[in-house]
Structure formats: C-alpha cells, structure tokens
Amino acid sequence: MKLAFMGTPQFAVPTLRALHASSHDVRLVVTNPDRPAGRGRKLRPPPVKEAALDLGLPLLQPEGVDDERLDQALREADVDAFVVVAFSILPDRLLAIPRLGSINLHPSLLPAYRGAAPIVWALFAGEQETGLTTFLLNDRIDGGDVLMQETVDIGPDETAGELEARLCVLGADVVVRTCDGLSSGRLTPMPQPRRAASRAPKLSKTDGRVDWRQSTQTIRNRIRGANPMPGAYTEWDGRILKIHRAVIDPASDQPAEANLGRTPSEPGTVLDITTGVTVATGDGLLRLIEVQPEGKPRMAAEDFVRGYSIAPGIRLGLSDDPA
C-alpha cells in the first residue's frame, strides 16, 4: 500500500521505521518545521525528520495544515492512505485525498480517553490497563471508525514516560497490521462503541500539583501520571519541590499517629525522614523516593534529607492550600 506518513515527536518514530521495513511504500513523510530549543535556542529538528532523513525518505515540513505545499505534495504522492501519529488535526480537504482514508494511532482503547494526553489521564485515574487503537480520521476528534485495538497492561509502578515508551513500540506493530488488513480488504472499520466516551484534554503545569488532602493512592497516581511532564510538584519552604517517584508507605493502612507516635497530622505534614520523606495524606502515608528542589537536579529523597532543611513537622503544600 502506498502511504504518506505524518508525525512529529519520538512517539511516532517507531511506526515510521516499522512501515519503512514492511511491504508498504512510504512515499512522503510530513512533519513540523524545526523549532528553537535548549538554552541556546538553536533550531532543533523533530525526531520524525531525523528518522526520515536516516531512512532516505522524501520529507516535507509545511508551516501548518493550511500550507499550500502540503496539498500539492500529498496529491502528487498519489498514496492510498495517510498514516497519522501525533500530528495536527487534518482538515476535511486533506482527509478527502487518500482513497482508503487516513489511519490514526491513538494510545487508548477508544472511546476512552479521547484527546491530547490519554496516557497521562489513564494513570491519573488509576487504570490498570490501557491500549492502542487504530481508526479512520473524520471530522470528530478521535471519533472515527475503529480498525484495530489491542489491550496493554499498566505496571503498578509505571510512569507515563515509561508507558509511552512501551506503547510507541507496540503501536508500530499495530499500525503495520492495520495497513496489511486494510490493503487486503480483510479489515472492516467498525463504529466506536456507544458507551460514554471519556476525555483526556491537553495538560497544563497545574495538572501536576499535588493536593495532600487526597488519598494516598490518588496522589501516587498523580505523581506517576505527571512523570515526566508536566511534573508533579508541591511547595516546600516557599519553593517548588518536584516529586518524581513515591511509594505508599507500608504503614499507610493504619492511622499515622499509631505508627509514628504522633497526634493526627494535617495532610502534607512531614512525619518521618528515616528512609526517604514520609508525608501524611488525606487517608494515610506516602513516602517520597525521588525529588527535585527548585533549580537543582533530581535526587534521591535520602540525599535531599541530608542536604536540605527538612524535618518532621514541616508541612508541604502550596501557599493557597488551607492549613
């Protein structure tokens, strides 16, 4: 099958490489322009561009989906289908070009977690499994007919970054099999299930904020889901403290005061610094394993305790949290 591939971030790279290695013919790769990045603000090529150049594939970097060069290049490529992975929303005029439609890879079991950040929101919700869906793009965001789905278990300690790294590799295989089935006519698009869809909107920095009044499990899910972006954080001594990893304290199924000999503590109170930093939550105890003080590198919580002023009784939390 003749294909045009559209994608930009690292998540899309395994799919591009897998399609190139398959029996399908990738005739054009479309990705975003190079963008300034890093301290020097030097132009940095997107990962898909680097992969396309490495594979020797024709490449186009339009300024956007309204760029006239994009329409012309896609029509001249004379492809059967587009494969879209982590790219812009395509307007109807582009969706009308390929005769077999536009295949999109989405890292959830649609219609669950439609939107820009399905992996993060699945972890925030404490899901134990997620999946991959290929579907045909239409004028509804993540609402097109399903081509193929595959369920993927979520590890109990897995972060969003770790899960994404697994899903992009597994997704590449799903896309190749989808293209195989679509080109042979064995694959029939099916409408998405009518059960209520859930949303996974674009993230903001405040989505990483830890509310210590919540349950221990909810906070831990927030920390896992926000790793690496947007990053879970709290306030300590008037500064931002990022939290990269945490575990539920074994004593969390008992009242904090029974385990640590203290009177009941406000959520966010540091109760112990013997092994990491143990903090009271809305219903138990959370032990911080890896943190990052503002302006400093990430470090083990034990090193943080040795190098900074942190002691039992200190309360973590943003300044507008109720005392």
Image (cartoon, grey):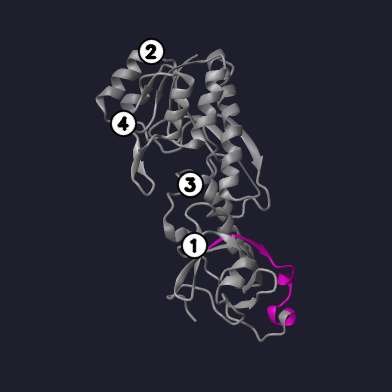
Q: Give the residues in magenta.
A: 242-259
Residue 78: numbered disc? 2
**Type of residue at label 3?**
Ala
Which residue is label 4 attached to? 65
Q: For the point 56% across and 42% down, which residue is it?
A: 164
Which x, y percent locates residue 31? Answer: 39, 30
* Label 4 vs 1, first from the N-terminus: 4
Residue 117: numbered disc? 3
**Type of residue at label 1?**
Lys
Per the model, the C-alpha gap separating discs 2 and 3 is: 32 Å
SS for callout 1: loop
Which x, y percent locates residue 313? Answer: 59, 82
Q: For the point 36% across and 31% down, which residue is it?
A: 90
Task: Determine whether, in the image, residue 121 is placed left or right of residue 141.
Answer: right
Q: Residues within 10 Å of mark 3 (few under 14, many from 20)?
A: some
16 in relation to 286, above or below? above
**Type of residue at label 2?**
Asp
**Type of residue at label 4?**
Val
